């Protein structure tokens, strides 16, 4: 059995969620989004949802201990044995180390960096806010999420480059155009 372990990273609004679903389908693995897990819990009014709601609405990161625990549980579910595509996790160096521990010596096969220019992504997110009404899609929270990304998540680019698994893709363009770019860059990297 070929196990495919992937990660997609990029600034808020780069289109990770949309592309994550397509990549996951292509490789026959589940797309696991920490943001989606948190939002589902907020919507469902669970204890976890209540704990994270204010944090997410402010654009801060949920504490690592809590986030790591959620991902560890999710990776133990049956559908993740053949691999997975992580979206939105790990998001800082501490979470990378936690994930390394969860994988017990196995490693990610590739990390897709979806590149997007700040002004472009702010415009996209404000447009999405009108349609989906995500509570963290106001302009000031969007700007804050971008600062958090620059400070905490951007350092991972160098880390994954050093590991030789980073694949950078230009996120500008139509959904299908970007999806094709990712698919060809990934298959070149993975050889499948
Ligand atoms: N790995 C994570 N660690 C901590 N907080 C997270 C993580 N993933 C998601 N979150 C929380 O959920 C929010 C939304 O994340 P996400 O859905 O990935 O959207 P985006 O990347 O567009 O900001 C983040 O701003 C953060 O508060």
Image (spheres, rainbow, N blue to C red):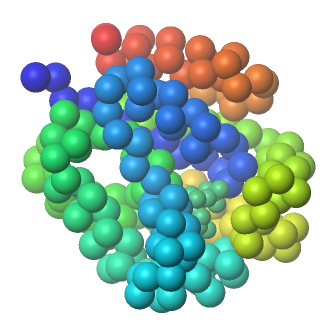
Residue 130 screen position, x and y as percent:
88, 57
**Quadrant where ligand 1 appears:** bottom right
In the figure, residue 68 lies in which quadrant?
Answer: bottom left
- Residue in the image at 69% along x and 31% along y: 171
Specify the quadrant that holds the N terminus.
top left
Front residue (pair 131, 163): 131
**Tag count:** 0
Residue 153 screen position, x and y as percent:
54, 59
Residue 109 can be seen, yes or no: no
- Residue in the image at 70% along x and 26% along y: 175
Front residue (pair 72, 145): 72
- Residue in the image at 60% along x and 22% along y: 179
In the figure, residue 191 lies in which quadrant?
Answer: top left
Say whether residue 173 is left or right of residue 63.
right
Q: Examine the rendered structure and indicate whether residue 113 appears above or below residue 26.
A: below
Say whether residue 119 is left or right of residue 42.
right
Residue 112 screen position, x and y as percent:
49, 34
Q: Examine the rendered structure and indicate whether residue 78 appears above or below residue 35.
A: above
Q: Examine the rendered structure and indicate whether residue 106 appears above or below residue 130.
A: above
- Residue in the image at 27% along x and 58% along y: 74
Specify the quadrant that holds the C terminus.
top left
Front residue (pair 49, 147): 49
Residue 20 can be seen, yes or no: yes
Say whether residue 39 is left or right of residue 134.
left
In the figure, residue 138 lies in which quadrant?
Answer: bottom right
């Amino acid at each position: 059995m070929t196990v495919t372990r992937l990660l997609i990273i990029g600034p808020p609004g780069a289109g990770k969620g949309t592309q994550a679903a397509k990549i996951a389908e292509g490789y026959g693995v589940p797309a696991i989004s920490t943001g989606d897990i948190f939002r589902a819990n907020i919507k469902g009014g669970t204890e976890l949802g209540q704990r994270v709601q204010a944090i997410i609405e402010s654009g801060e990161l949920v504490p690592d201990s809590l986030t790591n625990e959620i991902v560890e549980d999710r990776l133990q579910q049956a559908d993740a044995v053949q691999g997975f595509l992580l979206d939105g996790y790990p998001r800082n160096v501490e979470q990378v180390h936690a994930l390394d521990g969860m994988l017990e010596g196995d490693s990610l096969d590739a990390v897709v960096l979806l590149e997007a220019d700040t002004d472009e992504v702010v415009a996209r997110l404000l447009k999405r806010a009108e349609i989906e009404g995500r509570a963290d899609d106001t302009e000031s929270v969007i700007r804050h999420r971008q600062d958090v990304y620059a400070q905490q998540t951007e350092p991972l680019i160098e880390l994954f480059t050093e590991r030789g698994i980073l694949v950078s893709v230009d996120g500008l363009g139509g959904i299908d155009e970007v999806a094709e770019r990712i698919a060809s860059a990934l298959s070149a990297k993975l050889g499948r």
